[in-house]
Image: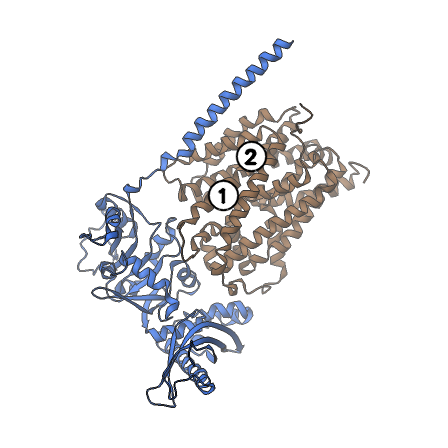
Chain colours: A blue, B brown
Amino acid sequence: MKRCSYSSSLHMKVKRRLTLLLVIFLFCIGASGCWDRVEIDERAFVLGVAIDLVPPSESHIEPIPGQVPIRDNIYDMTVEIPIVSQMAGAEGGSSEKEPNWVISSTGADITEISRTIMHRANRFLFYGHQKVLVIGEELAKEGIKPIIDFFDREPETNKRVKLIIAERDAKETLKITPKLSSAASLYIFEILEHEHRSSRLIDSNIGRALVSLRESGNALLARVRASEEEVVVGGSAIIKDWKLVGWLGEIETRAAMFVMGEVRGGIITIQDPRAEGGKISLEISSVKRIITPYVEGDDVTFNIEVLIEGDITENTGPNLTVSRETVEIAQERIGVLVKEDIKSIISKVQQEFKADFFLFSHLLAARRPHDWKRLESRWNEIFLKVKLNIDVRVRVRRFGVVR
Amino acid sequence: MRALLRDNDRITPFELAVLMVIVTLEMGVTTFPRTMTEKVGTESWLIPLPGFLFSLLAVYFLVRLSKLFPGKTFVEYSQEILGSIIGKLFVIIVIAFWVSTSARILRQFADVMKVNLLFRTPIEVIIFSMLLFAAYPARYGIEPMARLAIIVAFVTIPVGLFLFAFVIPQAKFDNLLPVFAQGPLLLLKAGFLSVGSLEGIELLLVLLPFITQPRKSLKASTWALAVLWSIIFIVNGVVLAVFGEKEVMYLLRPGLTIIQTIELPTLFVERLSSVYVATWVALIFPSISMFLFLASTSLAKLFGLKEQKILIYPLTPVIFALAILPSNVLEVENIANFLEQIGVFIIGIMPLFLFLIAKIRKKGGSY
């Protein structure tokens, strides 16, 4: 009896040991993840992508045999890849070679070009760290829908990739060598991340742009222009029905952002009426925007209330101290200035571009669903006649360490 | 020695609640914002209100049924109520539902893993290894699984919600409007249909006789529903507020994609989605285990077998085959939609129906 139970417990022990061994063995196979391993030196991290349209005369890609030749756009895609071995040496700043590789290829769609570049670079292109997607002017005029799909579908690409429209060629923006950043893509990305410093550029990323584009086909995207050693990021590109229809200047962009409630900072400067050459600058510290739609028949009115809070950072008025009068002048004049800016941008958008990128339609659908159902089919006409009551209030809170 | 060990076939009401929560949180939750928005538009974030009411009704009738037939699972009482043949048919439908639901979850999980983390691993390997690990605890009865669920719940749910908190700054609450523009009927209907994706309630069909304090089971499952619907409310609401109606309907799994929108100024972990997907691995594992356990237990009771243990491994090849069967993601989604309707039948309709028939035919205990 005793012996029997002993032997069975020994049996159990052996069984347990074997099970444990099996579990460890399975764990080793499962946890090491060798199957999907891609060594870091087999990967090329794509920092930025620029896509241009190849003019039809220059494209010399054979039509796919057996298919009816259709008019098809040929794209020119440029990617910026940091050279990792160079990056380590570049810390000292004495590296002779370029720290990044900018490589271009052409093809009929993004996946195809991506694969071509993969072969040329002999690396696995990895989009998980992509920072920017720059689209050239000509291509944007044709429509950005077919371009975005790849980056939207690709699971590695995150939704924070900046979506930018370039004046002229997009590839030029990736070819510049910035002085203080290690790569052109990072440079552009960081400028856009610091959009709130001036509010004269729009921080548009794929995620937010797609929300707006799918809602109405319209969006406001960042604008970039390449020069010799830097890129000029400022103003914005107007997209209507997924196509580029025009540009907004920097002040116009700020005004549009006031309407959309996205201003978070920036400087507004006004003339001091009490003296010639006297100026007052206000640094915006916070902005509140309240927008309310009113509908009467076919007349749509939006009440836009903007409350700006800020600090005076420069005052070159007559007696140089910030008096009660100075504060009142600043509050009033800045309010008038912003109001005029908003008025002019809205009339420009209504008359010139006829594109509702403010998403007034969405606002109406959200707040006045019954009226929206009635107006939806005629919205394109109604938008042109939308009236606005703009009320801008400015509050000066602080004015530095001197009076 | 033996007295110190707890039996492995009894769970506390608290463990039941945790199991209910953890079983329901599977891949379906990531598609939930889309399927709900397709049904009711911007009102989808309100669905937890009617959903909670309808699921509470289902839970109430299941608990009443178990009081009418103390110590019996649905396998026995549905045969008593509906008669042997129709009762058996119902039991078989439910078992088939559990088997195919676990196959559906496995397949969705494998597809997500393949797209996000394991690009080159064949889905057969992903499914097989997951199924193997899920089958292991299912052999050891309900009590070890309850403990497993507690560990998983207290690790993954806080991590998941923590990651979710970073999304909230992206939310635009205008996207949640308009509400009540289409009348309450559509919302009520959607709330009723959403009960079909709350697989956790089905645990009550089998587990109620195994609760240590049966009186507390209604309270515990109400708490489980409250927690569940709160989680769904947060996920649904935030996803809709960030993406807006149109984009939610465009995304395959809004509940997963949302993590990629997180914007942090100094984000040292650039790809949070990998962490997030990893939490889903832990979340679906107890669900599959539990469905295996439920299916094997019910089958054992149906055939009058003493042990459910021996049925676990014979069931795995069936689930594996079902998981491999659909040829693409679109088919999987269609199957998921179909299964949700079966779920509505099992959870939404049958408990009330069984209870009424039992009352009419005066079956069961005295009250």
Label 1 SS: helix
Residue B353 appearing in the image: no
Check the picture and name the quadrant holding the C terminus of chain A. bottom left
**Cα–Cα gap, marks 1 and 2:** 15 Å
- The x, y position of residue B182, in whole percent, is 59, 63
**Which amino acid does the dot numbered 1 rest on?**
Trp
Camera-side mark, 1 or 2: 1
Judge left or right: residue A177 versus residue B139.
Answer: left
**Which amino acid does the dot numbered 2 rest on?**
Ser
For disc 2, the marked residue is B289
Q: What residue is at 47 percent from the left and 75 percent from the top?
A: A309
For disc 1, the marked residue is B280
Label located before the other in sequence (1 or 2): 1
Q: In the image, is residue A278 above or below residue B228?
A: below
Check the picture and name the quadrant holding the N terminus of chain A. top right
Front residue of this view, candidates A115 and B360: A115
Residue A338 appearing in the image: yes
Tell me which chain the residue with mark 2 is part of: B
Residue placed farthest to the front in the image?
A402
Q: Local crowd at mark 2 within 10 Å, few (<14), some, or many (≥20)?
A: many
Q: On the image, which quarter does residue B118 sit in?
A: top left
Front residue of this view, candidates A153 and A126: A126
